Image (tube, rainbow, N blue to C red):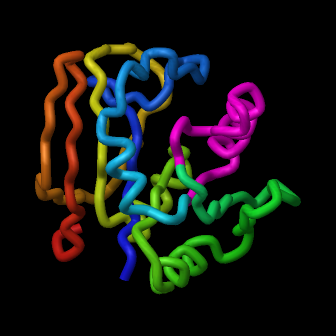
């Protein structure tokens, strides 16, 4: 079965975007393992808000939502969108069941790109297999937290940690399904 990997940038105080939706605090001065990660995946799960932000960014960057990202099967999870770009697949009904089916299909791993609502739902359903967090050395003080309050614990096992001279630390954890 394919793994669903939540991969994103996060501040040291747990935010994935600033109070006004900004992510200008993310380091872009080097690769930080992204090209190696791209070799592991062939699909992406993305929520409506993140999809719209990515499309807007791509318009000003030669069509690239994420620089260097190879062609991926893009699954857009939304109850409000009526259509998505050519080549993308809109998932509107029975989202978590559809995600389970996609994970069962042959292929490489899947990148859970965001956003926070989709991440929360997939974590709650036990669909996320791995977390790859690029922890940036900044305290925003407010913004959109990666995780909201939950009534359950999720146990993780450290797979890898890699510090960079910039102060960024890349952390990879597997989700312990038997202890969720």
Image quarter of the N terminus: bottom left
Q: Nearer the viewer, residue 96 or 129?
A: 129
Q: Quadrant of residue 82?
A: bottom right
Image quadrant in which the C terminus is located: bottom left
- Give the x, y percent position of residue 14: 33, 30
Residue stretch in magenta: 45-69
Residue 149 visible from this viewpoint: yes
Residue 56 magenta-drawn?
yes
Question: What is the total number of numbered labels drawn onto the structure image?
Answer: 0
Q: Position of residue 111 (x, y in %)?
A: 46, 57
| Quarter residue 15 falls in | top left
Judge whether residue 142 is colored magenta. Answer: no
For the residue pair 179 and 63, the one nearer the viewer reads as: 63
* Front one among 17 and 38: 38
| Residue 147 at least partly seen | no
Residue 161 versus residue 61 in the image, above or below? below
Work out whether 53 lies above or below 83.
above
- Residue depicted at 14% across the width and 29% down the height: 163
Residue 65 point in image, percent of width and height: 63, 38
Q: In the rendered view, does 117 fall on the left or right side of 40?
A: right
Q: Residue at x 30, y 48 (%)?
A: 132
Q: Is residue 65 left or right of residue 36?
A: right
Residue 159 sits in quarter: bottom left
Give the residue at x 49% y 26%. 17
Tell me where residue 100 appears, x and y as whole percent.
50, 79
Q: Is residue 43 left or right of residue 73?
A: left
Closest to the observer: 50 or 73?
A: 73
In the rendered view, does 132 fall on the left or right side of 99?
left
């Amino acid at each position: 079965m394919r793994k669903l990997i939540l991969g994103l940038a996060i501040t040291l105080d747990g935010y994935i975007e600033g109070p006004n939706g900004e992510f200008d605090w993310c380091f872009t001065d080097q690769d930080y393992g992204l090209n190696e990660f791209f070799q592991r995946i062939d699909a992406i799960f993305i929520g409506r808000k993140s999809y719209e932000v990515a499309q807007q960014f791509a318009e000003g960057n030669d069509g690239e939502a994420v620089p260097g990202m190879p062609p991926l099967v893009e699954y857009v999870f939304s109850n409000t969108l009526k259509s998505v770009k050519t080549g993308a697949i809109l998932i509107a009904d029975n989202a978590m069941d559809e995600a389970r089916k996609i994970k069962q299909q042959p292929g490489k791993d899947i990148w859970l790109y965001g956003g926070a609502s989709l991440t929360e739902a997939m974590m709650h359903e036990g669909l996320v297999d791995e977390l790859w967090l690029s922890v940036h050395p900044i305290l925003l003080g407010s913004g959109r937290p990666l995780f909201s309050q939950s009534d359950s614990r999720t146990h993780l096992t450290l797979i890898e940690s890699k510090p960079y001279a910039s102060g960024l630390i890349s952390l990879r954890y597997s989700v312990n399904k038997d202890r969720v």
